[in-house]
Amino acid sequence: MTSLQEILVGNTRPIFTLLLGAVALVLLIACANVSNLLLARGNARSREMAVRMALGAQSSRIVRQMLTESLLLALAGCALGLLFAAGSMRFLERMVAEQLPEVLHPQLDTRVLSFSIVVACGCGILFGILPAWRAARADVNHALKDSDHGSASRSKRRSQSFMVTSEFAFTLVLLIGAGLFLRSIIRLTKVEPGFNPQHTLAFDLSFPEAKYPRDEDRLRFTKDLIARIRALPGVESVGASSSLPLSGRERGESLSRPDRPQPSEQYVVGVSSVSGDYFPSIGGTLLRGRFITEADNIPTARPVLVIDARVAKDLYPDKNPVGQYVDFLGKSFEIVGIVAPMRHLDLEHEPRPSVYGPQAQFKFYNDPSFLVRSALPPSMLVATVRKVILLADPDQPIANVRTLEEAVHQSLAPRRATLTLLGLFAMVAIALAAIGIYGVMSYAISQRTRELSIRSALGAQRRDITQLVLVGAMKPSVPGIVVGLAAAFALARFVESQLFEVRAHDPLVFLSSVGLLGMAAALSVYFPARRAAKVDPIVALRAE
């Protein structure tokens, strides 16, 4: 018993939960960024706020003013974000269309608009409280002293360092997540599907019972159509099957050896009925014996099966299965060939043990899928094949025309879409972190102009100044990286089920993410540090 909701959207829930978490991390990074910059701005306006309070402004009015500015900033960002979202909606819909059920379509509506406004207002108030509280607690006498102009207190520097540390931690978690999915999809692209998808056209037909009431009618039409398509110029082989690889569908039946007692648990295999030159058309690999031929595909022929290597290993580990018999569908089938396993469901799961039999021997033959292998590009055959089908039956519906290469590509679409979105979020996170670190460091260095000028006047070289600033600026990154690694290590187990042949704690991904984040941080700090090293001490001290 499964709920309809689970059938429609159940497989998408883990992916969208992951993406929702990525969105939350980017939001936190942006909020920490803005809060840090507001702290710096509030510190730069400390004299202004001190003058206001000296003239009689209450602390509540200072807090209201700062929160109003923060809220207006958040709402302006919300408006720009919604405009950007509306403009990128088509791109998003194309990206996730292949992994969303048809009942779900991404769109901007009143609920999304309301949610965005509430989040923007909440973040504006929440992350504007600290700068507002700092401004309201300013010591008027201390702030108005000329000797303290522009300096930052130790508590303010701690607040800024905490925000930078948080940015590093959140960004590192996102980077590691994107890195894990990148390695996963790279592994997936290297998976051997068990067939050759190149130069092969595929399409599906439907046999209405009113027009094709008997199995013989369906078999006759299939053979006739295969012969017609095979006669087209450039066509090398044509075949049909009840289920193609990567189609996501496959019938299961039990199978056993006649010379062994019936096991307590049935040995279930995937079953595909085939016609024409199915294996040459799919590009299957014959390991032993022979393929199924047209001579096997008549009702009076002896029942034969082609099995894959997994069935051969499970049923006949001690002998050559070709020529042996199995009990299947209530009768005895002779094994005439062994082929390499093919992935019927998707590229992520191991291929299920499968057998292939002639269409004439199976009474459960589904609506067939046809394969046409040609030396020509498959797209050049589509119009000609359609004409041939309609000549054979003008009422025959033709569905899901695609190439096998497109089928392989489509099977990777959910992973690719997730990776693309996670990668975009990670890039945005790095950019936000770099901008935030650059802004904070530019402000911090401007506050240290007098100190750095004195050091320079006393003989410090530009290299010494640059090194001093770089080391001081990178200090918050160390606890941020440590916290980010710990958080990513703890959260990795939640995405482990979405990975393919990649460990959730892959050391290469973790180290690469740390290196990339450290490089971005070093670059964002380097330019303010170099600018500080170029300050003329005489000019700076004269200004003081």
Image: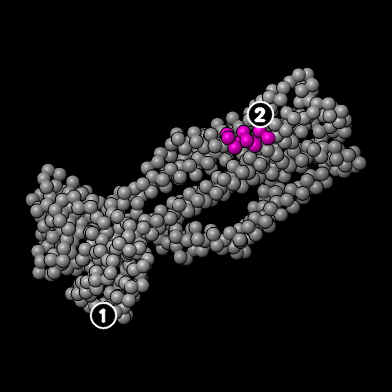
Which span of residues is magenta-colored? 518-527
Q: Is residue 390 left or right of residue 21?
A: left
Place of residue 125 in the rendered image (x, y in percent of width and height, measured from the top left):
71, 48
Q: Which mark is residue 211?
A: 1
User: Relative to 181, is 109 above or below?
Assistant: below
User: Relative to 433, is 197 above or below?
Assistant: below
Task: Please say whether residue 288 is visible from this viewpoint.
Answer: yes
Task: Please say whether residue 268 is visible from this viewpoint.
Answer: no
Place of residue 153 in the rendered image (x, y in percent of width and height, measured from the top left):
76, 30
* Residue located at (32% from left, 80% from top): 395
Q: Quadrant for the N terminus, please.
A: bottom left
Q: Is residue 162 left or right of residue 245?
A: right
Towards the viewer: 57 or 309: 309
**Gap in angstroms between the C-alphas marked 2 and 1:** 80 Å
The image quarter containing residue 407 is: bottom left
The residue singled out by tag 2 in the image is 470
Q: Main secondary structure of the magenta part?
A: helix
Q: Are marks 2 and 1 in contact (CB under 8 Å)?
A: no
Place of residue 72 in the rendered image (x, y in percent of width and height, measured from the top left):
74, 52
Place of residue 298 in the rendered image (x, y in percent of width and height, measured from the top left):
13, 69
At label 1, the amino acid type is Lys
